[in-house]
Amino acid sequence: MSNARTSQEIFEREFLELRSKLLELAASFDRMQRGPGEPDQRARLVALGLDILRDDNGDKAARIQVLFSREYSPDWRVEFGI
Amino acid sequence: MYYIDPHIHMVSRTTDDYETLARMGCVALSEPAFWAGFDRSSADGFRDYFRQLTEVEPARAAQFGIQHYTWLCINAKEAENVELSREVIAMIPEFINCPNVLGIGEIGLNKNTPNEATVFMDHLDLAARLGQLILIHTPHLEDKLQGTRMILDMLQSDSRLQPERILVDHVEEHTIKHVLDGGFWAGMTLYPVTKCTPQRAADMIEIYGTERLCVNSAGDWGPSKPTAVPDFMIELRRRGHSESVIRQVVYDNPLTFFRQSANFQFREPLDLDTALA
Ligand SMILES: [Zn+2]
């Protein structure tokens, strides 16, 4: 389905929301940094997710979903013994 | 505009919620059998639940002019208990001819375990033998992609099943294409915490079009918003989409899917208008 809105129109509508989401992320990172110790390995996934936001490719939502997904094995029935 | 919520758990909602849905334009809904917020201790617990779905809720909905339909099964969460599941599956034929039953659902996977897969295939066999429509629950978060692909694998390896008679629910950006490419119907669930927002659902409509896509609120025991479908309609309207596009997703599509069930005797509010004129 064609979306008649231009990038600028979308940006105009979402600018304040984008700004606010960035601030939420920034504040989460600050909070973790203020706490003692280190977060577990999932923090690595979050870092990779930020890379996806920054790269030049599309399908960012789908790629972030896949990043946080367990892998599918076509041989799952064999592994399950069914 | 009238709309239909194809997936909402009204047993966990108040009567006031029915009234709010009616005020928002909801004229029909379908309620899949699901987890009750706790594990039931026996098959009789499910017998009572099936009575609630086939007798109590339709009457509660009718008070507000909403047509209530339902689906029967033992959900994926309780399907870990295979023995109990088989007792419940054996009881389903007793209820399958109740006038508001559309088929078997919401069956699926939760943690993608061997027991869940076994019980899922038992349900598929029941649906195939009884010629019933199927409504499918896909798992959440990190289990969704793996579980959805396992489910599609099981559906596609049973030659008795027709994809156009199956709706795979809770699709998101990474699973929607797998489902639509298989010829199945897909449902997007608008859920505040773990699933999809009205904005992301609107994005998927813009990317994949309106064919074989529905939206629902889930409205269950967890944090959820029973009026999420109208939120989605407003989002499409704000983006400048036509009323006919909105209507196709929230009204025409559920009707087309449900009409494949002989039990779906929907009375169109528009027809009622003409009848009264
Ligand atoms: Zn559900």
Image: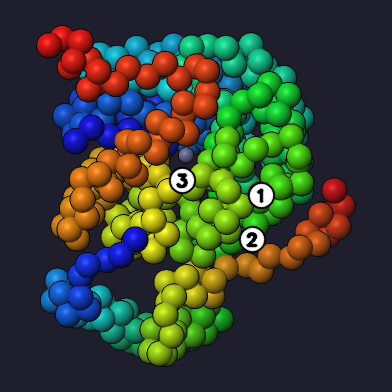
Amino acid at the residue labelled 3: Arg
Q: Which of B80 and B96 is in front in this view?
A: B96
Q: In this view, does B98 lie to the left or right of B123?
A: left
Can the viewer see residue A9 in this picture?
Answer: yes
Rate crowding at label 2 as few (under 14), some (14 to 19) or many (20 or more) other CA atoms within 10 Å.
Answer: many
Q: Position of residue A8 (x, y in %)?
A: 17, 80
Name the residue located 34 percent from the left edge and 44 percent from the top edge. Answer: B249
Total number of numbered discs in the rendering: 3
> How far is the residue under mark 3 from the one under mark 2?
22 Å
State the residue position of label 1: B151
Same-chain check, marks 3 and 2: yes
Residue at the location (18% across, 53% down)? Answer: B237
Q: Position of residue B7 (x, y in %)?
A: 42, 36
Give whichever of discs 1 and 2 has the lower sequence position: 2
Residue A31's disc number: none
Does ligand 1 reach within 8 Å of label 3's beta carbon? no
Q: Do the residues labelled 1 and 3 touch (CB within 8 Å)?
A: no
Which residue is nearer to you in this view: B199 or B211? Answer: B211
Task: Name the image quarter holding residue B76.
Answer: top right
| Residue occupying image coordinates x 25% and y 44% | B244
Three-letter amino acid code at the position of disc 1: Ile
Residue tagged by mark 2? B146
Chain for disc number 1: B
Q: Check disc 1 and report its element: helix, strand or loop.
A: helix
In this view, the residue in front, B243 or B94, is B243
Q: Is mark 2 on a helix, strand or loop?
A: helix
Above or below A56: residue B42 = above
Label 3, on which residue?
Answer: B212
Q: Name the chain letter of the residue that bears numbered label 3.
A: B
B57 with respect to A21 (left or right)? right
Q: Position of residue B196 (x, y in %)?
A: 38, 56
